Amino acid sequence: MKALWFLIPLYLLPLLIRSDVVLTVLIFTFVLGILAIGFNIVFGGAGQLTMFHAAAFGVGSYVTFLSMLHFSIPFWLGYLVAVLIVVLISIVIGWICFKFRLKEFYFAVVTLAFAELFRLVALNWTSMTNGTLGMLVLEKPTVWLPGSGVIKIEETVPWYFLTLISLTGILIFSALLMRSWIGRNFSAIRLNEDLAQTLGIDTFRYKLLAFTISNVIASFAGALYGFYTGYIEPAYLAVAQSLDAIAMVLLGGVSTILGPVVGALVLTSLPHLIELPAEMRVAVYGMILILVILLMPRGIVGLAAGLVKRRAHAS
Amino acid sequence: MLLKVENLTKRFGGLVAVSDVSFGIEKGEIIGIFGPNGSGKTTLLSLLAGLLPPSAGRVFWKGQDIAGARPNVIASLGVIKTFQNPQLFSELSVFEHVMIASFLAFTRMKDHSRLRSFLAPGKGEATLRARAEKALTLCRLQGSSEKPAAELSYGEEKMLGVAMAMMCEPELLLLDEPASGLGNDEIQNLENVLRDLRAHGTTLCIIDHKVAFLAKFADQAIALQQGCKIAQGRPHDVLADPGVVKAYLGRSHHA
């Protein structure tokens, strides 16, 4: 939980920096960080390599927006509909995968196939989703603030705070989860599933729980993302989106609380820091990613924690 | 009767690993199951722990049929099995190993609210930690508590398996060849631990191929050969049984 103090400077940042570019990069960091935290719970926690999180992300944005549109309800109620649907989808897919004891790459491939299925639905159900063209989102989330009543989140700074508060909430939840008996059971499953089961842990139930929690968190990131960018398209559900989140977690540090956020920050800001022609940029960016993962198998946070420990040991 | 096994059979294709075995275990008793390699001892234990589904027969735990139930269900009823080759959660320390095995103890804590322990682990966590210390002391591992489990010797790894099992507060502990691969000192240590477990009131079912080792502890012995029970009774009587002698030595004493 101590790690969360690092968030305080982020709350003060808008007082110092007015640059829209910096705040925008940070908003993307927070939203994609939430997606990465979700992935870290199921992969870094329970050891299940899911490829479904991008689909949950996409379903989150589509369902939130479509239910607002069709039922004329506010953003948060629309998101509630998305949560219900994502929980249902997760239970069905998780049930199929875990009943058939799919592990590692088999689990990854089957969840990837399900994710593609949902992407194809988003692509081809044109009457509902507008297909490849995507949908413009003109609605904005609203929040109630004491003193100012209900306000719309439109400008950069309100978006900054909405996404930062959301990130903080999700981080606190994930820290509590990982140190609770649930997180302990997740670790037991990740490290030795057969042993976990003989120690009385219902591995099926806890894997299903990890998968569902992770997808609900991913869907929240998706809802925020779609409404912030003002645009929803089938590419949100694509495998590239899943891989981005995986890269963030690997880079930041698997199984650490802050790792996914650090990874999201690096991978979101890197393209802006390296000023290269577009075609070079992707290559350089890929090389940096490969090197970092090879040289820091426990990610940035894992490396930093190791250094702090070593220093404490030496003094 | 704590555990009652009726006509338990396990076939792997054409091979009958356990054939029509029946016996019972009373509370507080130590039962030793022995037999040469390949006689079906480990398979029998795996059937009891739910790691394998039986092909036929029934297993009653306090009157409830548990044959074919999932391992975690059987574990939550109070039957815990250790492994012949130590199973570990590799990257964790010894103490973390025992803590990660605390789930059943956690679910049985009377004054716990799951929501409260989610938001503020405090008190329940302290109870579990105290219990973990106790399990480690019982297994003579208190000195290695902060060590990474990967640094333990083979014998210590096996003791850690027992400590994790004891953290689950088993009523019946199934020990799969606890003495195999141990040095003499470690066997002595194991014997002391087993005496403590018995004093603790845990019912034990131990399988081993070292007859002398089992004979020291067991109240009751069962001899297996090629999946069949060939003798049952007090250890000394079983060891003197002509069938057992023949199975072990390949011929009868009197021949």
Image: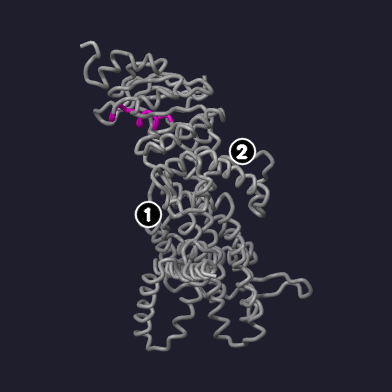
According to the picture, the residue beneath numbered tag 1 turns out to be: A104
Q: Chain of mark 2?
A: B
The label on residue A204 is none
Q: Amino acid at mark 2?
A: Arg
Span colored in magenta: B37-48
The colour scheme used here is one colour
Closest to the observer, B224 or A12:
B224
Looking at the rendered image, the quarter that the C terminus of chain A falls into is bottom right
Tag 1 and tag 2 share a subunit: no
Q: Nearer the viewer, residue A162 or A88?
A: A162
Is A222 one of the magenta-colored residues?
no
Q: Residue at x 63, y 49 (%)?
A: B125
Name which residue lies at 39% across and 22% down. Answer: B57
Residue type beneath disc 1: Glu
Question: How far from the left and from the top, in percent, is residue B13?
Answer: 26, 31
Mark identifier at residue B108? 2
In this rendering, the answer to whether A90 lies above or below B84 is: below
